Structures are given as C-alpha cells and as structure tokens.
C-alpha cells in the first residue's frame, strides 16, 4: 500500500475507468477498479479505501445507492462523477454523503487537484466507537492551548482532533460540514458569504479569481442544511447558524 492509501474507481465505462485509475495511480494511490456498483461496495470494504470515485449511472445499482451502502461502513472521501449537468444530481449526491462531484467529461488535472485538496484535510472519525481516521488526532504528547477549542451555546469544536460535541454528546459530521462549522465559529458572528464558504469546502483549489457557479453556492446551502439537521437546529430560534438572506450565514448570538 502507498503512503496515500487505497483509491477505488467505480465506473462501468472501461475507458473512463482506466483514465481515472491512471490519474490516481500517478498521484500516488494504490488503485483498484470496479465495473459495477455491487462490486464497488465490496472492493471499498475489503480494501479499506481512502478515496472513491463513483459514477452515478452504473449498470446495476445507481451511484446514490452505492454511496448509501458505502457510508454504512466507510468515511472514505467520495467524488461522484456524472455525465448529466443536472443540479438535482449534485444535490442528491451531497445529501447522500458525497464530498465532491464532477461532470463528465472532466479534466484529469482538475480531478487530481480536487483529490489532493481533500487529502490535505484530515477526516473525522466515522462513528462513535470506531478508530480515528489516519491523521485525525494529535500525537499523545501534544498539549493544546485552551483557546484552540471553540465553544458556543453548548457546542464544542476541537479543530485539532476534528471532533464536535453537542451538549456533551459526540456529533458525527462530514468533512465539509465540519469545515463550514469551523469557519463560522472562527468568524465569531461576522457574516461569511456563500462564495467564501464555497472556498472553505473546495479548499485552495478555488482561488480568489476562480469562477464560482450557482451550483457551487447551492451545494453550500445543502451542506448547511445537513449541518443544521445534525445539530437539531430549531429554524425559528437557531442556537448556532443564522441565514443572512441573499448574502450567506453567520453564528447565532451567544446565550447565557
């Protein structure tokens, strides 16, 4: 196994599968391919994949169902690939637990850059009682300063261990959800625009001059919606996340 770990390419088009395998192999992954959804689930499970590229339009079960099954046992980064420029596909993928999405035909360099940006961020623990993902926790000898942990209205976020607790109970978030929550806590009540938050989710791949589409901003809305659901946010009296209509989001005021 390479230092980057295992990548699994789930794609029924042989030419596309070989292209993606070549891109990820050149990036330094130990790459395995699967030509169907059911095979892909088993390969991800048996190989303990770190990254998965997943075609939506597979010939047995669709990519959304494959992703749902993968998320039952794995916190691998998942990039969904689709031949349809349909916003509904994008939103469904993010709701189901994808980390990113790309429309075919895609540029191999862009795929490699997006995967590299994801891998530079540690993953969260998959579920309570499982082992932390590689790089998710600090070394045993590391002493964290007190102000490195964010506390707000019963929510505690530790950026070093990438852990979140809500009223003392661990809360499992995806990478994107964690990064958005972290960004809003760091802003300390200042408004973060949707464009700002797109860059938070995408990492340094989206520089200051990069074009950001309505679909990118809509993806942030989906992530924020998922985050609110996991935090059991009251939409009428939010404890953590407030919408600034037409602009973005900010942290709700502190409550005694």
Image (cartoon, rainbow, N blue to C red):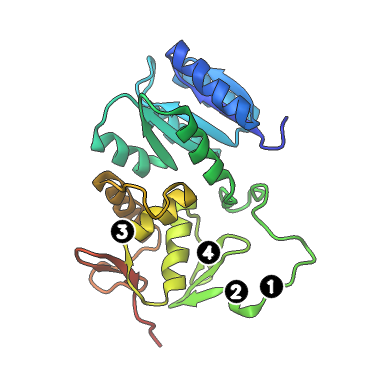
Q: Where does label 4 land, which residue?
A: 164
In the image, residue 233 sits, relative to residue 61, either above or below, namely: below
Q: Residue furthest top?
A: 14
Q: Indicate the position of residue 195 as horizontal and vertical percent values.
A: 32, 57
Q: Alpha-carbon distance for marks 3 and 4? A: 23 Å
Q: Residue 148 carries which label?
A: 2
Q: Please, which residue is most extreme toward the right here?
A: 141
Name the residue located 53 percent from the left edge and 71 percent from the top edge. Answer: 168
Camera-side mark, 1 or 4: 1
Label 1 neighbour load within 10 Å: few <14, some 14-19, many 20+: few
Could you say which disc has been placed on residue 144 in the image?
A: 1
Q: Which is nearer the N-term, disc 1 or disc 4? A: 1
Instruction: Tell whether label 4 touches label 2 (CB within 8 Å).
Output: no
Residue that badge 3 annotates: 194
Say few, some or many: other residues with alpha carbon within 10 Å of mark 2 (under 14 / 14 to 19 / 20 or more). Answer: few
173 to the left or right of 241? right
Can you tell which mark lies on residue 212?
none
Depth-wise, is mark 2 or mark 4 nearer the camera?
A: 2
Q: Position of residue 183 (x, y in %)?
A: 44, 65
Residue 221: which quarter of the image? bottom left
């Amino acid at each position: 196994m390479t230092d980057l770990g295992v990548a699994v390419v789930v794609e029924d088009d042989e030419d596309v599968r070989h292209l993606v395998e070549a891109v990820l192999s050149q990036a330094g992954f130990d790459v395995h391919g699967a030509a169907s959804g059911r095979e892909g689930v088993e390969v991800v499970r048996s190989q303990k994949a770190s990254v998965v590229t997943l075609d939506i339009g597979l010939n047995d079960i669709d990519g959304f169902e494959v992703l749902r099954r993968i998320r039952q046992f794995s916190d691998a980064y998942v990039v969904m690939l689709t031949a349809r420029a349909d916003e509904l596909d994008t939103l469904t993928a993010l709701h189901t637990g994808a980390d990113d999405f790309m429309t075919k035909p895609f540029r191999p360099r862009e795929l490699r850059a997006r995967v590299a940006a994801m891998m530079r961020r540690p993953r969260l623990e998959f579920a309570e009682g499982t082992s932390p993902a590689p790089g998710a926790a600090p070394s045993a000898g590391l002493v964290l300063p007190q102000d490195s942990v964010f506390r707000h209205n019963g929510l505690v976020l530790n950026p070093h261990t990438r852990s979140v607790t809500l009223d003392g109970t661990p809360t499992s978030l995806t990478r994107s959800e964690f990064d958005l929550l972290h960004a809003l806590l760091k802003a300390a009540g200042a408004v973060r625009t949707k464009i700002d938050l797109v860059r938070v989710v995408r990492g340094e791949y989206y520089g200051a001059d990069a074009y950001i589409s309505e679909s990118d901003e809509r993806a942030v809305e989906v992530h924020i919606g998922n985050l609110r659901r996991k935090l059991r946010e009251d939409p009428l009296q939010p404890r953590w996340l407030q919408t600034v209509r037409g602009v973005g989001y900010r942290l709700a005021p502190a409550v005694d």
